[in-house]
Image (tube, grey):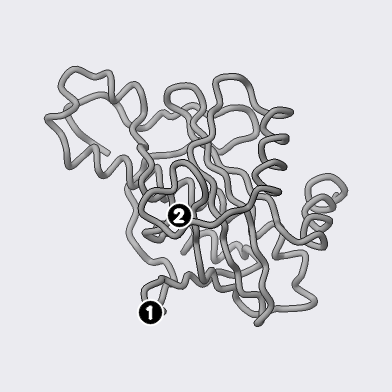
Amino acid sequence: VSWAGPPVATLPASSGQLLLGMAASSSTASTASAGDSEVFSFPAFRSEEWIKTEFDNIRAPPAVLDGCDLMPSYMRDYPTVNLYPGKIAQVREQIRSALFRQALFKVQNVEVTSMEECREPRMLRRIAGFGTGAAGSASVSSPTTSFLGTAVDWWNNPKDVQLMREELWSVDRCGQPADYHVRYYKEGGDGFSATVLPTGFPDMWRALKYYYFSS
């Protein structure tokens, strides 16, 4: 992104998290209208061709991070930042889509382990925000996963990492439901990241095998 204000291409993230690049992208995401919701289709297996042609161009559905303030601190603190509302909106949208891609990548890491059961593309049919920060979107209650997510945060996250929002993603796997809890964080002043927790015990086990036991 080129503009006469502070740079927008360096958002630090903690070790193991995605560094969010701010390169502009076109919209080629596979989506379809389903009533008032937007259905997003994606493959369980990330082929080299799909990564090259589709992944970087994916745009986040409207419900993702709805109502969250995605302004990096270094931009907020820039004296004349309000003179560039269009560029501010562009940067926020790029951060939102980059976080969506990061979360999608982690969902695919679980979905690829069920390829023997279902080789068809997956359908992300619903995104619902929960609790604080879920303004403007459908709200659901999930105290168990919120407790689990909070425990994981306490164990893994440094003190300067704060939860921005939690969402429930409802994925259609060949007609079978596969839900995921997606948690978004702000790291320090300028970093952002996402984590994914499957809701079903079989998928939790698959995720553990993928991350800790795969070669």
Secondary structure, mark 2, is helix
Residue 8, compared with residue 50, is above or below; it is: above
**Which residue is located at x 65 percent, y 68 percent?**
44
**Residue at coordinates 67% horizontally, 67% vertically from top-left?**
178
Q: Amino acid at mark 2?
A: Asp
Of circles 2 and 1, which is in front? 1
Residue 74 point in image, percent of width and height: 33, 21
Mark 2–mark 1 CB contact (< 8 Å) = no
Q: Is residue 21 left or right of residue 167?
A: left
Percent across and percent down for residue 50 are 54, 65
Q: Which residue is mark 1?
A: 35
Q: Amino acid at mark 1?
A: Gly
Position of 15 with respect to 59 (left or right) is: right
Q: Is residue 130 left or right of residue 177?
A: left
- Of residues 90 and 160, which is closer to you in this image? 160
Position of residue 7 measured from the top left corner of the image (x, y, whole percent): 30, 26
Determine which quarter of the picture holds residue 193: top right
**Which residue position is annotated with label 2?**
56
Q: Quadrant of the N terminus?
A: top left
Q: CA distance from mark 2 to mark 1?
A: 27 Å
Q: Is residue 59 or residue 48 the one in the foreground? A: 59
Residue 26 at x, y percent in the picture: 32, 59
Relative to 39, is 12 above or below? above
Residue 203 location, quadrant: bottom right
The relative height of residue 104 versus residue 160 in the rendered view (above or below) is below
Judge by depth and name the residue closer to the eye, 186 or 211: 186
Disc number placed over residue 3 in the picture, else none? none
Which comes sooner in the sequence, label 2 or label 1?
Answer: 1
- Whether residue 100 sits left or right of residue 83 in the image: it is right
